[in-house]
Image (spheres, grey):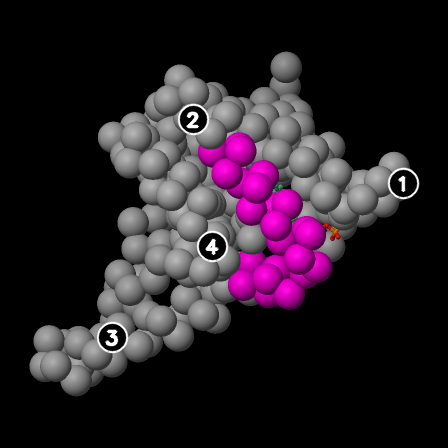
Amino acid sequence: MNQNTTIDTDRLPKHLAIIMDGNGRWAKQKGMLRVFGHENGTKAVRETVEASAKLGIENLTLYAFSTENWNRPKLEVDTLMKLLVNSLKNELPTLQNNNIKLSTIGNTNQLPESARKQLDEVIEITKNNTRMTLTLALSYGSREEIVSAVKAISEKIKTNNLEISDISESTINQHLYTSNLPDVDLVIRTSGEQRISNFLLWQVAYAEFYYTDILWPDFREKDLHEAIISYQKRERRFGKTSEQIK
Ligand code: FPP
């Protein structure tokens, strides 16, 4: 295979974030209810998680449920919560076999107790796994995350545990849900939509974006590989000139 079709495993994104979009449209195309799309979306989740670990990606973050998604019809929200609980139960062996640690970002206190219990259990069981960190963004909103960081930082100033002059980018990083994760290198969004939807606004400052028309339930290992190959063809300059990078 030539250079254009193979993945250079020395230059993988350290942090890949995915906006899994198009479940509803996928179901509608088949004349089915939206929840059928979400059910099939879980298969794409499994394949993507396994394929990412196999490649050697160290951090994978999936946008599974946004703060705004609470406004969806009750049947859809309830189904998504049930799917989350069932997937966590069913996929624990996948996480263990692949040495994957589960983590979450978001206001998970808002989740139903069954989901929180299941999450806590899987997080505890997988906490020493080292190959890849899989982070589920659940009841997640980036603006809400930034507000909560500002509150925590303000509290430290108020109680004389931090000087205003000492606030830096690193202070903000340390107070975000993602404090243990590197910046995002690559964002993939499926379904043809090209927007960020309140996802990791601070963390994507220098990320590359990859959009595909594929609807999330149809997203497969080959599609992940295509996205990584596209990422590897780009020149990331971080504000410098092309000559400086070379
Ligand atoms: C967006 O499609 C998808 C979601 C809001 C939920 C994503 C959930 C899953 C893939 C399944 C469960 C996840 C885990 C981690 C077990 P959409 O409903 O907005 O699609 P549409 O834009 O076509 O309506």
Q: Earlier in the sequence, mark 1 or mark 4?
A: 1
Amino acid type indicated by mark 1: Gly
Q: Earlier in the sequence, mark 3 or mark 4?
A: 4
**Residue 45 lies in quadrant:** top right
The quarter of the rendered structure image containing the C terminus is: top left
Question: Circle 2 sits on which residue?
Answer: 92
Closer to viewer: mark 2 or mark 4: 4
The quarter of the rendered structure image containing the N terminus is: top right
Amino acid type indicated by mark 4: Leu
Q: What mark, if any, has residue 111 been given in the picture? A: 4
Q: Earlier in the sequence, mark 1 or mark 2?
A: 1
Closer to viewer: mark 3 or mark 2: 2
The residue positioned 63% from the left and 19% from the top of the image is 2
Q: Find the distance from the CA under tag 1 to the CA under tag 2.
A: 32 Å
Question: Does residue 186 appear in the picture of this structure?
Answer: no
Magenta includes 79?
A: yes
Closer to viewer: mark 1 or mark 3: 1
Answer few, some or many: residues within 10 Å of disc 2's Cα (few below 14, many 20 plus, some between 14 and 19): some
Residues in magenta?
A: 66-88
Q: Earlier in the sequence, mark 3 or mark 2?
A: 2
Question: Circle 1 sits on which residue?
Answer: 31
Q: Find the distance from the CA under tag 2 to the CA under tag 4.
A: 20 Å
Answer few, some or many: residues within 10 Å of disc 3's Cα (few below 14, many 20 plus, some between 14 and 19): many
Question: Circle 3 sits on which residue?
Answer: 153
Q: Find the distance from the CA under tag 1 to the CA under tag 4.
A: 30 Å
Lateral position of residue 88 relative to residue 151, left or right: right
Where does residue 42 sit, x and y in percent of width and height? 61, 34
Closer to viewer: mark 3 or mark 4: 4
